[in-house]
Amino acid sequence: MSLAERTHLHAKPPASAALTPDASAWSIAQNPAPWAVAVILLIMPLLANGFFLIEIFGTTLILGTVALSLMFLAGYGGMVSLMQLTIAGFAGYMVAVLGVSGSAKISLGWPWWLATPMALALATGFGTLGGALAVRTEGIYTIMITLAIGAAFYYFTNQNWAIFNGHTGLNTIATPQFWGVDWRADIPFYYVTLGVAALCYFAVVYVSRAPFGLALQGVRDNPRRMAALGFHVNAHRIAAYALASLIAGLGGVLQVWNYRQISPGSVAVERCIDILIIAVVGGITRPVGAFIGAFIFVILRTFALDVLVQLGLDGNRFRLLIGLGFLAVVFWSSDGVVGLWEHWRRRSAPSSYRGGAHHG
Amino acid sequence: MTASRFIERHPVWALIVLVAAALLLWLLLAVWPPGLEEAIGRKRVFLNAIFNGITLGGLYFLVASGFTLIFGLMRNVNLAHGSLYLFGGYVGYGISTATGSWLLGFIGAFVLVALVGIILQIVVFRRMEGQDLRQTMVTIGLSIVFADLMLWAFGGDFYQIATPQWLIGPVQMPFVTAVKSSGEAVYLQYPLVRLVIFAASVVIGVLMWLALNRTRVGLMVRAGVDDRDILAATGIPIQLVFVFVFALGAGLAGIAGVVGGTFQSISPGEDTRFLLASLVVVIVGGMGSIPGAALGAVIIGLAEQLGSVYIPTYAIVVTFLIMVVVLALRPQGLVARR
């Protein structure tokens, strides 16, 4: 029924680089690519200037974190939730409302170390409640219900002035400054996003192998059999929503610190769908796919205008490009870019491919 | 379940429904005492909200009935349905301004949007039959592409389809809104065009119900909703039925676009709005059910209008709460087929 489930049938579960549990996969000699990526990410501030560091890599990591939460739900739980960005946006709004922003009438002015955990807790609660609603029905209905929740939240932020300040939103939101460091300055902020993204990534990888994650994948593949084995199917699903909401909430907090403003436009339905596009284009069966998809998306969004104009086309047709690219991925490679990459690796080096234990 | 059986089985609920209906009737017909007007505002405002809600429900029904029909038969959650609505609006605007005929706009929108639906079904969805999630993803991609193409072609402007001369102007409704000091009763004035459009959507709904329940094609469609595979096994050309239903559903969205363009206006972003409306209507009413779509549409239309009059900054929450309550109590929808 789910995209992930189907891809299991034709794409032999491969050892996706840094994800295999056996120790040899962690050695640099056997698997250099993930180590190279990690090193490059760590020394990025030496390689890139402020624009690239934040606008490209920081944004990629933030969007990737939000998409990772969708990947976790869809890839391991078989639940395609379109409200992950809404949860992120909710967390962002809560940071603005509880913390310090330009709208003194609305913001409560809490210090960041109080406002941020509170915002995360509220976002997790919000997402869990939404998830509890969505699991009332099955399969394809999840998309409808989560999309309805996302759209309703967008219209609500637009028309509510008491909490969300209507369509102007909240501006000049304070960012944390302590230990003599302005954590919104380019380089510290890059490391903050990198740290949070890495934390979420490894948390998802870990959970996918933990008993809970395995049970969740069982629920995805055959809920009836898991129920017969004594697992509480819906409890697993709701718990998955809770974890995904926390991850999405972290992404949302980073997002609001990055732009220092939030408005209904940040939680519009198109943004929710962007997250789905990112996860699907990257490859919804692997955690790393979320970040690859985010990177492609951010590159396209930033440079499509220039490239299109260079080619003599209308530069405003960025969304057309995104939509067509998404359609192409859904039509021809349901495993996204990660799937293509693994396909290519297997073809080019069939002897070195070791099958690998799979989590599924 | 017939009325008498319902009363027998749920006497308390029947009483509550009866009292609520009586109260509503009294609110509609009686001249409000001054205390009530002070508490919740003028009766004219209330009556207007009720009528706006019901007529908006008619529009929602037109959009959502196509959505639910396609879903019921093909299990295809067509998230590009809002785009079909918007496209219908633009086509209707183009034709009615070019020819000066409002009705031609309807016919043109129905035919052209139904054609788009036929192409979609034959070229895209037939290739991935039975893959619910993949179809839904494709409809998301299509909605992005359509939205951008329409933005390209028509720009970000608001278009309003001109109401024909013979429908302009208010009519007097048999509802007293207030009594003047001279003792003369003041009646509610309401735009004729909205009433006509509501009547038309009721007619379309009844026709659809008749077509589904009294004709041979309708028989095939209903059988297909119940069990697609068995229907195909009996030798019915099921692909033809699919194309027919997709064309009908899309065409209805096109008609709704013209209606929406006359009621309100059409602009980029309306596609999302009406997609949300169809989603909520169908979730509340019951997925795949035409009467469910009608009931859901009226409930959501009323909730939206009454909400925007009495609690303007929380109106959407009312709509949303209705969805939550229905999902919590009856996840399959109010009028579910199964």
Image (spheres, rainbow, N blue to C red):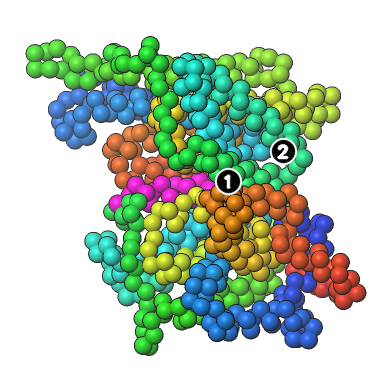
- Residue A154, magenta (yes or no): yes
Q: Which mark is residue B144?
A: 1
Q: Residues within 10 Å of mark 2 (few under 14, many from 20)?
A: many
Quadrant of residue A116 in the image?
A: bottom left
User: Residue B323: x percent and y percent?
Assistant: 47, 42
What residue type is disc 2 on? Phe
Q: Residue at x 82, y 57 (%)?
A: A10
Chain of the residue on which disc 1 is drawn: B
Q: Residue at x 66, y 69 (%)?
A: A288
User: Residue A1: x percent and y percent?
Assistant: 72, 49
- The one of A225 and A336 positioned closer to us in this rendering: A336
Q: Residues within 10 Å of mark 1 (few under 14, many from 20)?
A: many
Q: Which mark is residue A326?
A: none
Q: Tell me the element at label 2.
A: helix
Q: Residue at x 45, y 41 (%)?
A: B156
Q: Which mark is residue B125?
A: 2
Q: Is residue A334 above or below residue A287?
A: above
Does residue A98 appear to the left or right of B62 in the view shown? left
Q: Is residue A105 above or below residue B129?
A: below
What are the residue bounds of the magenta stretch?
Answer: A142-161
